[in-house]
Image: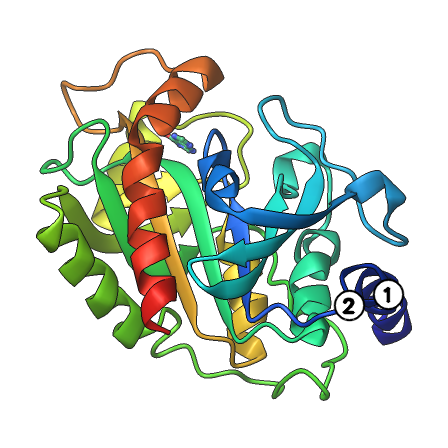
Amino acid sequence: MLEKIKETATYIKNIIKSEPQIGVILGTGLGGLVEEMKIEHIIDYKDIPNFPVSTVKGHHSRLIFGEFSGKKLIAMQGRFHYYEGYNMKEITFPVKVMKLLGIEYLFVSNASGGVNPDFHIGDLMIIDDQINLFPENPLRGKNEDDFGVRFPDMSETYSAELIAKGVEIAKENKFTVHTGVYAGVTGPTFETPAEYKYLRIIGADAVGMSTVPEVIVAHHMRIPCFAISIITDLGVPNKIVEVTHEDVQNVAEIAEPKMTKIIKEIVSQL
Ligand code: HPA
C-alpha cells in the first residue's frame, strides 16, 4: 500500500514541482473555491496512477493545484464515496497521497442533512466532532506506522484552533454558522424519519455520506482538520420533505460562496 501511495505522490510531484501546504476536499456542488484559485496544474484522476475515479453526478474528478489566499493548495474536485462501491482504503488513499506531497492542513466541505431542530436550510455548520456510522474504520488492518499510531486519540479530531477562527470569520461576515456533530453514514439512501430521529438521539446535528473516513485518516497522520457542512435539507420532525440529489446540489451551490469565504480567510491566517 505504502509503495502505491509513494508512486502516486511521486507522479504528482513531478508535475506540480512544488509542495502544497494545504489540502482541500470539495463536496457536492462546492467546487466554487477553485474559481478563486490561481491555477497552476489540473490533473484528471484518470491520469493518476492508482487513483480511483469518481462516478457521482455533480462531481468533477480532478486534482487542482495552485495558489489560494497566498498559500500553495491542492484541491480534490470530486471525492470517493462509500456508496459508490469504494472501500475505506480507496476513499482515503488521496489523503495519504496529499500527506506525502506535504500538506500541513486539511479542509473538507460537504452537503448534509440537518437533524438539529434549530438549523435551517442553507445554514453552515462547522464540524466540531463526528460519529462514524460507516460499517468500517479506514484504519482497520495492519497499521501504517509511518503515518501514525495504532490506536489514535480522537479527543480533538477537528482542530479547535481552526474552528475558533472559522466561527470568528463567520461572525465578522454576518453568516449564520453553527458548530456541531456530523454523523457519517454510507448512503446512498437518504434517511427515513426514524433514522433521522435516531441520529438526533445519538448526538448528531447533521448527517452526510462523506468526510468521516478522510478525517479519520488525516487525523491519524496528525494533520489538523477543518470541515464545514452546508445544511441542504432537514431531517427534523414536521420539516421532513422529499429530498433529491438535485435539491442538495442547488442549496449547496447557493451557500457555497460563504463557505469559500470562511476557508479563504482561515487559510490567509495560517
Ligand atoms: N442525509 C444524508 N446525506 C445527505 C443529506 C441527508 O439528509 N443531505 C445531504 N447529504
Q: Name which residue lies at 44% across and 26% down.
A: 190
Is there CB contact under 8 Å for labels 1 and 2? yes
Q: Quadrant of ligand 1?
A: top left
Extreme-top residue of the structure: 242
Quadrant of the snapshot with the N terminus: bottom right
Q: Name which residue lies at 40% across and 72% down.
A: 157
- How far across and down, in percent of the image, does residue 58 sit? 58, 23
The numbered disc on residue 76 is: none
Image: 56 above or below 257: above
**Residue 200, visible in the rendered structure:** yes
Estimate how packed mark 1 is, as few (under 14), some (14 to 19) or many (20 or more) residues with alpha carbons within 10 Å.
few
Q: Hey, which quadrant is residue 180 in on the image?
A: bottom left
Secondary structure type for disc 2: loop
Q: Amino acid at mark 1?
A: Asn
- How far across and down, in percent of the image, does residue 113 sit? 32, 33
Q: Nearer the viewer, residue 153 or 101?
A: 101
User: Disc 1 and disc 2: Cα gap in Å?
Assistant: 6 Å
Q: Amino acid at mark 2?
A: Lys
Color encoding of the figure: rainbow
Task: For ligand 1, tell me if the residue under mark 1 lies within 8 Å.
Answer: no
Q: Nearer the viewer, residue 67 or 29?
A: 67
The numbered disc on residue 14 is: 1
Q: Which residue is mark 2?
A: 17
